[in-house]
Image (tube, rainbow, N blue to C red):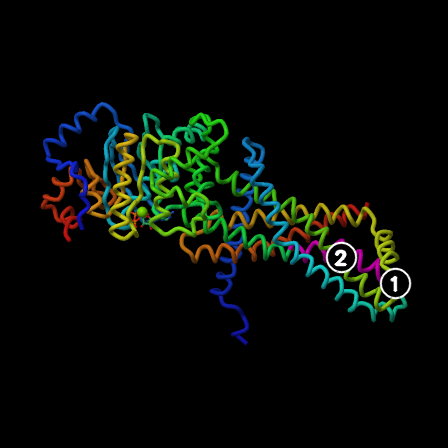
């Protein structure tokens, strides 16, 4: 599988990565320190660390069930970690009251693993839903149609506006979900397995979409995946989540050249 | 002989079940407390409340009407011979009216709604939980508890009493039909007798009771759905246990209601 269709795909080398990392060094938008989370005897995260710098594409890879979804759910306050420090855009999540948390969340886009479209609402209502509580942020007076249209056009699905989610295919659902994520113009987007369960061609389309959105809006992205090809195309930096910790970090080329057996396992075809 | 004595193992199993039941009741009351806390906090999801009220009323009207009609019909048909035996057939509207308004109408309608509405809510919220729609609401700045749970519990609390009144009226209609055909009692006479027989002491406890019935149905349905376990199996279990638990609690509430109104009667 080969996803690079754009000529401008950066062939990242180590020193280049170092340079770009230095540029980002001034501002971390997400910081996780020593986060732990267990479900009974099942210790999912055992001191996980992660930093997402402004404007960067960070890929987190890990086996199924390694706790990737748990990690980003802790990040937006959907789950509370057992211990550890989580900071998003300079605010510690666990200390926020509901209102501040909601305001913060309007700057974070979350693409759910299973799309999570509201199946009792049309596509349009789905996209309007996040706007209910954040009208002032967008400065909308009444008509939300242009915004809905813009978001849908971004993902090339303007014609589905009045359909119900169960009338869409899996890939279309994912794109609508992406449009819903984008509608509040978030500064950070968290993608939970954006390509899982999709055929390679649709997966490629989604990845292209993610890249064009990144370019258009200059967002910082945290991408969770176990799709190596997706990681290669989109990542500027990668973190491998193994045994509940950030086992290895680096660029795609650094990590794929690693001889550590646990790291190698990810890149073996 | 020895086999008829339950073993220690069986007793402990029953005790475990009982414990589980009380834990559930405890969790349910926490859920209810959260409902009351969020009920009075802004913003109100008024539009969603109206939508839920409309849907619940609309979806259950036929069913409640049908059952009510048959209950009224059957109750009258069955008790007619006995009443004739006692020479009290003219008391028929009083007997049927009071028993339907005070007990049979509310309980039957509430049970039907437990089957229809509580399971519906359990399945709907359950599948929303499983497919992460509730999480998606949460991260998009809408409090899902307010939007989904508070509106639904309010809707059942308001709509079940209305459905119960509707069911009662249809049941009386069914009964009047039998009296009309078999006993040559005119509809007007029948309903006059019924409304004469009914006192505030019959209506008020029944009305208060039906609000509690509505509350229980919404509460249990939402509770089971909101805390649905992962997987599609979880949705089925949520829907199923919602009906069982709601029906059980309905009888408990009914018992308490009858008990309490009995005390007031004595005074
Ligand atoms: N709500 C929960 N209650 C109990 N255990 C949970 C819960 N959520 C997740 N887990 C457990 O945490 C572990 C990690 O789950 P998680 O969903 O984060 O995996 P993942 O890395 O996202 O996997 P996948 O790639 O399949 O999505 C699993 O073992 C799962 O059983
Ligand atoms: Mg996951």
Q: Nearer the viewer, residue A97 or A143?
A: A143
- The quadrant in which residue B189 appears is bottom right
Label 2: how many Cα within 10 Å (few below 14, some 14–19, many 20+): many
| Callouts 1 and 2 on one subunit | yes
Closer-to-camera residue (B18/B8): B18
Q: Quadrant of the N terminus of chain B?
A: bottom right
Quarter of the C terminus of chain B within the rendering: top right
Is B109 included in the stretch rendered in magenta? yes
In the image, is residue A263 above or below residue B80?
Answer: above
- The image shows residue B65 at horizontal and vertical percentages of 69, 57
Residue A173 location, x and y as percent? 37, 47
Please name the residue shown 10% across and 44% down the image: A258
Q: State yes or no: residue A195 in magenta.
A: no
Earlier-in-chain disc, 1 versus 2: 2
Q: Is residue B73 above or below residue A50?
A: below
Chain for numbered disc 1: B
Q: Position of residue A220 (x, y in %)?
A: 28, 32
Q: Position of residue B232 (x, y in %)?
A: 42, 56
In the figure, is residue A73 to the left or right of B220? left
Q: Name the residue that disc number 2 marks.
A: B100
Circles 1 and 2, Cβ within 8 Å, touching? The answer is no
Q: Residue furthest front?
A: A159
Q: Please identify the residue farthest to the top as the structure is shown.
A: A26
Question: Dot 1 corresponds to which residue?
Answer: B185
State yes or no: Cβ of the residue under disc 2 lies below 8 Å from any atom of ligand 1: no
Instruction: Check disc 2 and report its element: helix, strand or loop.
Output: helix
Residue drawn at point x = 17 percent, y = 40 percent: A248
Q: Which residues are magenta?
A: B92-110
Q: Which mark is residue A75?
A: none
The answer to which of B199 and A137 lies nearer the viewer is A137
């Amino acid at each position: 599988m080969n996803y690079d269709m754009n000529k401008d795909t950066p062939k990242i080398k180590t020193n280049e990565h170092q340079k770009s990392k230095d540029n980002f060094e001034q501002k971390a938008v997400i910081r996780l320190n020593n986060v732990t989370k267990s479900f009974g005897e099942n210790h999912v995260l055992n001191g996980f660390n992660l930093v997402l710098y402004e404007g960067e594409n960070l890929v987190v890879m890990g086996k199924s069930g390694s706790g990737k979804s748990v990690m980003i759910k802790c990040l937006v306050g959907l789950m509370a970690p057992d211990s550890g420090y989580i900071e998003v855009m300079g605010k510690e999540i666990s200390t926020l009251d509901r209102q501040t948390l909601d305001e913060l969340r309007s700057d974070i886009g979350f693409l759910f693993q299973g799309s999570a479209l509201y199946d009792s609402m049309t596509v349009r209502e789905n996209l309007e839903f996040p706007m209910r509580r954040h009208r002032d942020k967008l400065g909308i007076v009444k008509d939300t149609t242009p915004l809905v249209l813009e978001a849908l056009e971004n993902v090339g699905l303007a014609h589905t506006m009045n359909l119900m989610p169960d009338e869409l295919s899996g890939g279309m659902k994912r794109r609508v979900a992406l449009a819903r994520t984008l509608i509040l113009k978030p500064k950070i987007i968290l993608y939970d397995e954006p390509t899982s369960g999709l055929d390679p061609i649709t997966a490629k389309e989604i990845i292209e979409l993610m890249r064009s959105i990144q370019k258009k809006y200059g967002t910082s992205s945290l991408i969770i995946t176990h799709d190596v090809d997706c990681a290669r195309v989109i990542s500027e930096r990668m973190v491998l989540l193994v045994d509940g910790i950030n086992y290895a970090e680096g660029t795609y080329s650094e990590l794929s050249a690693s001889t550590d057996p646990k790291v190698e396992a990810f890149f073996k075809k | 002989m020895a086999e008829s004595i339950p073993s220690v193992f069986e007793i402990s199993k029953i005790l475990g079940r009982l414990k589980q039941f009380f834990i559930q009741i405890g969790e349910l009351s926490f859920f209810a407390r959260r409902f009351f806390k969020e009920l009075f906090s802004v913003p109100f999801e008024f539009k969603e409340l109206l939508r839920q009220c409309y849907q619940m009323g609309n979806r259950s009207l036929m069913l409640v009407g049908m059952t009510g009609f048959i209950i009224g019909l059957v109750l009258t048909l069955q008790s007619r011979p006995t009443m004739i035996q006692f020479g009290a057939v003219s008391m028929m509207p009083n007997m049927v009216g009071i028993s339907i308004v005070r007990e049979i109408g509310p309980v039957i309608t509430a049970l039907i709604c437990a089957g229809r509405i509580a399971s519906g809510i359990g399945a709907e919220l359950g599948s929303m939980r499983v497919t992460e729609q509730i999480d998606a609401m949460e991260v998009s700045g809408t409090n899902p508890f307010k939007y989904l749970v508070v509106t639904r519990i309010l809707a059942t609390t308001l709509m079940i009493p209305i459905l119960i009144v509707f069911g009662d009226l249809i049941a009386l209609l069914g009964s009047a039909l039998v009296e009309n055909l078999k006993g040559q009692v005119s509809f007007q006479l029948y309903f006059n007798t019924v409304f004469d027989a009914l006192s505030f002491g019959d209506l008020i406890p029944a009305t208060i009771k039906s609000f509690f019935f509505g509350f229980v149905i919404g509460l249990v349905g939402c509770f089971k759905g909101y805390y649905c376990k992962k997987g599609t199996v979880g949705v089925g279990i949520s829907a199923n246990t919602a009906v069982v638990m709601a029906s059980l609690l309905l009888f408990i509430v009914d018992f308490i209601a009858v008990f309490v109104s009995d005390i007031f009667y004595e005074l």
